[in-house]
Amino acid sequence: IVLGVAIRRFQWLPEAFFPSVEKFSYNICFPALLFAGTARLSFRSTDVGALALATLLPTALIVLVSLLGLLTARTLPDAARSSVVQGAMRPNTYFGIAVSALLFTPPTAALVMLALALCLPVVNIISVVALSWWSGVPTDPRKIAKALATNPIILSTLAGVLFSLSGLTMPAPLMNTLDILGRAALCLGLICVGSGLVFSLQGLRPWALGWTSLLKLVAMPLIAAKACLMFAIATPVALAACFYCALPTAPNAYIMAKQMGGDTRLMASLITLQTLLAALTVPLSRHFMQGLA
């Protein structure tokens, strides 16, 4: 993130660098990461239903709460509203994959990847609808449908699920290529986030920043923990679900906001703040869930 700030501030590279990198990351690197990850998963497990319930239910409730909160924020611009919705529910896939391997056993870490595969199409559909609705352009259902049908994140995740279900094996050179591109997604995504940061109090929108971060980092994992207890969900699945719900918002949300007319200033601030706070909140949510178990 700091490197992205420095590149733009000191003009180390041409201004056209960032739009090109954003498109490359959004359309190639991040889809490669998602396809390769989901293609390796097993979707025949009996844990799939429980994991979907424990992640999608909190997601739906948080989206509802964020929309209700936006009803009271009458002065908030439309572009900022779409960023609030994204920031309240989208997970940081890079963070989730990397940190779950450090915190959990391999079977639980695989459940985290499965949770991402189950939820990413849903949260991206919600994000596309929110961005289209509040883009300032009259809403056209056909344009929304086209945006969903051509969204590279949704398509790559669904393609990975279908490939996994097919039982086919990806040739090693092709999978290695996808893995290399996927690893590049983290670096490029964070550089783009840094390039969008504006170190000024003007237009910061502290209310939206604080409210959205509270929903994402505190309310969402607590709702997930409550759901796991209510439905007696097995401990490994519950740990994966609560970890997923505790993830900070996605760097890719900034790129989507840039591409579709969201509030990039607010989105970059949300990503930075939540990523920093997650160093504290994610381990706390893990220990909290383990204590309940």
Image (tube, rainbow, N blue to C red):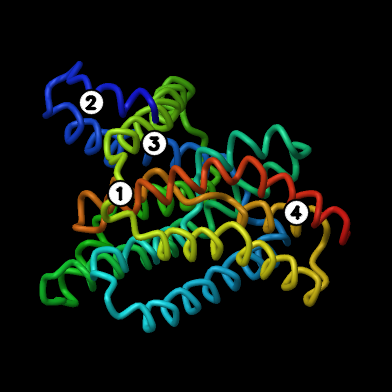
Please provide percent x and percent y for residue 13.
Answer: 17, 18
Determine which of the numbered discs, if any, sits on residue 32 in the image. Answer: 3
Residue 286 higher or lower than 218, as above or below: above
- Cα separation between marks 4 and 3: 27 Å
The reply to whether discs 3 and 2 touch (Cβ–Cβ < 8 Å) is no
Looking at the image, is mark 3 or mark 2 nearer the viewer?
A: 2
Q: Residue at x 25, y 22 (%)?
A: 7
Element type at mark 2: helix
Count the marks: 4
- Cα separation between marks 4 and 1: 29 Å
Which amino acid type is shown beneath numbered disc 1? Pro
Count neighbours of disc 4 (C-alpha within 10 A) and say few if under 14, some if 14 to 19, many if 20 or more: many
The residue indicated by pointer 2 is 9
Q: Is residue 250 left or right of residue 116?
A: left
Q: Is residue 245 left or right of residue 195?
A: right
Which amino acid type is shown beneath numbered disc 4? Leu
The residue indicated by pointer 4 is 239
Looking at the image, is mark 2 or mark 1 nearer the viewer?
A: 2
Q: Earlier in the sequence, mark 4 or mark 3?
A: 3
Please provide percent x and percent y for residue 236.
Answer: 79, 53
Q: Residue at x 27, y 56 (%)?
A: 203
Q: Residue at x 41, y 59 (%)?
A: 206
The residue indicated by pointer 1 is 152
- Cα separation between marks 2 and 1: 30 Å
Q: Nearer the viewer, residue 227 or 43?
A: 227
The reply to whether discs 4 and 1 touch (Cβ–Cβ < 8 Å) is no
Q: Is residue 99 left or right of residue 179?
A: right
Element type at mark 1: helix
Q: Quadrant of residue 47?
A: bottom right
Q: Residue at x 60, y 54 (%)?
A: 115
Q: Earlier in the sequence, mark 2 or mark 4?
A: 2
- Cα separation between marks 3 and 2: 30 Å
